[in-house]
Amino acid sequence: MAWGKKKGGGRKEPKFGLAASLSELRLNPLDRVSVADDDKPKKSPKRESGGGDKPRKGRTSSKARSKGGLRSGIKRLFYWGAVLGLWGAIAVAGVVVYVGAHLPPIQSLEIPKRPPTIQIVGIDGSVLATRGEQAGTNVALKDLPPYLPKAFIAIEDRRFYSHYGVDPLGIARAAVANIMHRGVSQGGSTLTQQLAKNLFLTQERTMQRKLQEVELAFWLERKHSKNEILELYLNRVYFGSGAYGVEAAAQRYFGKSAKNVTIAEAAMLAGLVKSPSRLAPNRNPEGAEKRAQTVLAAMADANFITDAQAQASIGHPSYNVKAVGAGTVNYVADWIGEVLDDLVGQIDQSIIVETSIDPKLQSVAETAVIDELAAKSVKFNVSQGALVAMTPDGSVRAMVGGRNYAESQYNRAVTAKRQPGSSFKPFVYLTAIEAGLTPETIRQDAPLDVKGWKPENYTHQYFGPVTLTQALAMSLNTVAVRLGLEVGAKSVVRTAHRLGISSKLEANASIALGTSEVSLTELVGAYAPFSNGGMGVTPHVVNKIRNVEGNKVIYARPADALGQVIDPRSVAMMNTMMQETLLSGTAHKAELPGWSAAGKTGTSQDFRDAWFIGYTSKLVTGVWLGNDDNSPTKKATGGGLPVEIWTRFMRAAHQGLTPEPVPGLQPSGFFATVAQAVSQVVPGSAPQSLAPPPGYVPSAPIYNGTRPQPAAPTQAAYPGARAAPQPNARPEAASGLDGWLVERLFGR
């Protein structure tokens, strides 16, 4: 560009030469000046020709730059590490606060009491079953053999006495072992942590629960000494099979106190803690023994025992102790559990329940039901059975609620309600007796139509005029229905309720045939007044409840206040009729040599239920057989399998007892035979050993009415039935000693 003037002094405009270009107007990077450089003298850059820039004076070397970068990196690393550490600490503090917020206040924490245990004992004091935790009494650490606690320390927490609740070395060791085994092969929990979990926490496996466990472990270590923690642990840890604490476990598996266990037994107990349910010796003896060997090796490694002691202890535990509370007695235990709340309310302490159960009779009852069903259940298509035996005052001596408690806990003796069939008829006949009829009253056995309903006899035969004794012994349906209509269904219902039936009964014509459902226990209880002279009873099994120390009685059963529910004369007449059921009627297979007995069979519609309730002066026993789904059996009747089970049980139950007659009946069998024979030979000189016990007074007058010979069709209807004896007849011939005495005295 050139600036100039025209001649003559005129204005000259700038001109751009051709050399000027737009690129020259652009700023060069060197032309840009930073704000910081405004006050500094500007230096023109030196451009060198030739091969590139040369190092300028004052430029930092590569080595210096490396050192500076390293220092800067360390500073940054330290800075961010501190930041992350601070946030980590804040996070940990937050987790601790959160976890602690879900725990009860530490200052108010207390070692919880043992959950209450219910120990159920029989009439002889033996333990029948245990409900709740089976906890033995607390055992002081000083009373245990020294190798017992050491066995737990050796296998569970070798550094127990050197850590403060949590063992970092143990956690690290467990972590390494688990990584090497690619699974959970070891645990890092200390004994203190395990105790904290058992006392305060659940068994769930969550991080929150684990952190709570750690906090509680620290609290336990601060609150208690090491020996106190170890003692608590040994008395609270679970050993399987319902046993909590070393005392309960030793009793459970070895039948001895923990104070007396051997080294081998101590090792087995310590080994159970890892997996009590899986390693319980009564379930897995091989696994328990293998684990015990591991414990013995650990004890030797820790110098708690010598190698020789460890080797000598292998294979020596004796754990063949039969588990208590097994079998059908658990039906009794369940029933007790149901009634306890009514008796004592909420249970907040361990208790001992003293029952009326006789363990020997319970065993006999269980065997009778199970064996008979095993032999004949397929033949009769019967899958289940139940038995209840009680004394005439209502004390239950044995109860079987089913053939296999492990398979079904449903109690068919208490809970199940089924149609009793003809076993309900005694309430109909009693109502008729109380209305003025007698065992010799005649009623027609003939077809009957009740508004379209036509009840029939089991044999479809009709015998015409029969006495009430014959009708009840042969279980004639038409006579029972006629009597029910005669006295009124409502009266029959009232009679049944008065004697102890608590179930709802429908007051209709079919009630006479037992169409309303009842339970076996209440039906047996309603028969009890016939055996005791007419006194009302309440079936019961609990006699007394006391605390485990035995110094406080929480409940004692009061005497029944039901009083007389049947007139003694009516009792005598009813027993006379029901005795005939066993002599010539539907229960003629029931035989108790030397004992007078009475009862009634029952078969419901379509053979769905088979019953027999029979009694002596000592026991009232009822048997029920059927199917849980109410399906028909293959013609199983009350006079068949139920009578066979009843006879088997009652013979064993009466063995060794002195025969006594049922109220209102003459002595029978061997007792009656000898007593009557001797009295006839030498009047008034019956030996005391054969006569009723001194001071015995029947609670009902003996019924002396005549009993006519059963009608001829009875023999055809019931093959093998015996004809009823005629009044004043000599004793009938009998087998064995009975027969020999009769032949010698009467020439028969």
Image: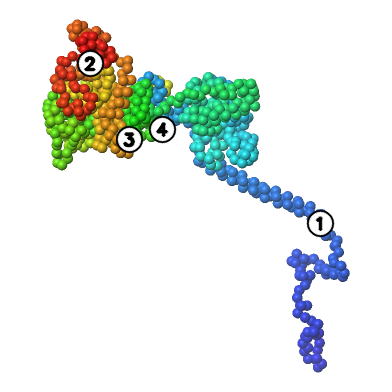
The picture places residue 239, in percent across and down from the top left corner, at: 51, 29
Q: Between tags 4 and 1, which lies in front?
A: 4
Question: Which of the marked residues, 3 or 1, is nearer the chain's N terminus?
Answer: 1
Rendered residue at 60%/45% (across/down): 90
- Kindly report the distance in space between the C-alpha atoms of the residues bearing marks 4 and 2: 47 Å
The alpha-carbon separation of the residues under discs 3 and 2 comes to: 38 Å
> Which residue is tagged 1?
62
Label whose residue precedes the other's in the sequence (3 or 2): 3
Q: Which residue is mark 4?
A: 406
Q: Residue at x 19, y 22 (%)?
A: 723
Measure the alpha-carbon separation of dots 4 and 3. Answer: 21 Å
Q: Which mark is residue 733?
A: 2
Decide if residue 118 is in sight here: no
Kind of residue indicated by mark 4: Ala
- Left or right of 43? Residue 703 is left
Disc 4 residue crowd, few under 14, some 14–19, many 20+, Cα 10 Å: few
Q: Furthest residue to the bottom?
A: 8
The amino acid type, in three-letter code, at marker 2 is: Ala
Q: Indicate the secondary structure of the residue bearing disc 4.
A: loop
Which structural element holds mark 1?
helix
SS assignment at label 2: loop
Frontmost of labels 3 and 2 is 2
Residue type at mark 3: give it.
Asn
Identify the residue shown where x is 56% and y is 34%: 193
Tag on residue 381? 3
User: For the residues marked 3 and 1, what is the alpha-carbon distance in whole angstroms?
Assistant: 102 Å
Foreground pick, 39 / 468: 468
Disc on the earlier residue, 4 or 1:
1
Inspect the image, locate mark 1, and give the three-letter code of the amino acid beneath it: Ser
Disc 1: CA contacts within 10 A as few (<14), some (14-19) or many (>=20):
few
Image quadrant assignment for residue 516: top left
